[in-house]
Image: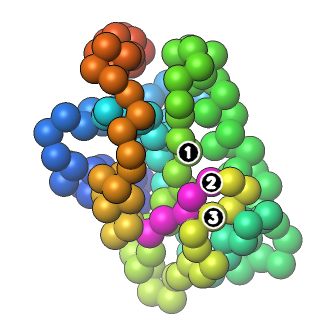
Amino acid sequence: MKGERLLGKALSQLPEGWRIWHDLDIGGENIDHLVASAKGVFIVEVKNYRGTSLALPKALYTHGSKKPNHDIPRQVWRQVNKLKDVLGEVYISPLLVFVIGVNAGDNVTGLPVTTNIPCLSLEQLVPHLRDQDKRLSYAVAKPLFAQLDALTK
């Protein structure tokens, strides 16, 4: 929860025009944070793990384990696919954010990508989102945002 609160605070720094939905239930899948603007739709999964995590192109290792953690990438891709089922074939980008430094001795190495999911630190998130190219027109974004608003009610 502490990691999610810190991430929510970081997302509040996004400029006007960005929409943020927290703790979004999409029918059996829970999205920590969903962020959208003309730059696209982003599922942001946040992790605040103790110990060392290592993000490599083909695997993610957490809690200092020598065995890969396949659950997190699978969870994120399930969320992407489930959201596409709900919204249609709109571009959805998954992001995995590690909140580092909350616990002494915690760190993440090997960033930036694991299993085709960009891995970011909390400090990298907002600049990463702002640096994206525009992907959605106003005509596409407006009804999409209304559809997302309806999911939260």
Q: Which quarter of the rendering shows the C terminus? A: top left
Which secondary structure is most common in the magenta stretch? strand
Q: Secondary structure at mark 3?
A: strand
Tell me if residue 32 can be seen. Answer: no
**Position above or below: 111 against 31:** below
Q: Pointer 1: residues within 10 angstroms few (<14), some, or many (20+)?
A: many
Task: Give the residue at mark 1.
Answer: 94
Residue 51 in picture, x, y percent from top left: 60, 80
Check disc 3 and give the amino acid type: Val
Res. 111 image quadrant = bottom right
> 56 and 64: which one is in front?
56
> 14 and 108: which one is in front?
14
- Magenta stretch: residue 123 in it? no
Residue 67 in picture, x, y percent from top left: 85, 71
Q: Earlier in the sequence, mark 2 or mark 1?
A: 1
Q: CA distance from mark 2 to mark 3?
A: 5 Å
Q: Residue furthest left?
A: 16
Q: CA distance from mark 1 to mark 3?
A: 11 Å
**Position above or below: 20 against 139:** below
Q: Secondary structure at mark 2?
A: strand
Check disc 1 and give the amino acid type: Pro
Identify the residue at image location x=83%, y=78%.
Answer: 66
Q: Is residue 30 left or right of residue 82?
A: left
Start-end of magenta stretch: 117-121
Label ID, residue 113: 3
- Magenta stretch: residue 120 in it? yes
Dot 2 and dot 1 residues touching (CB under 8 Å): yes
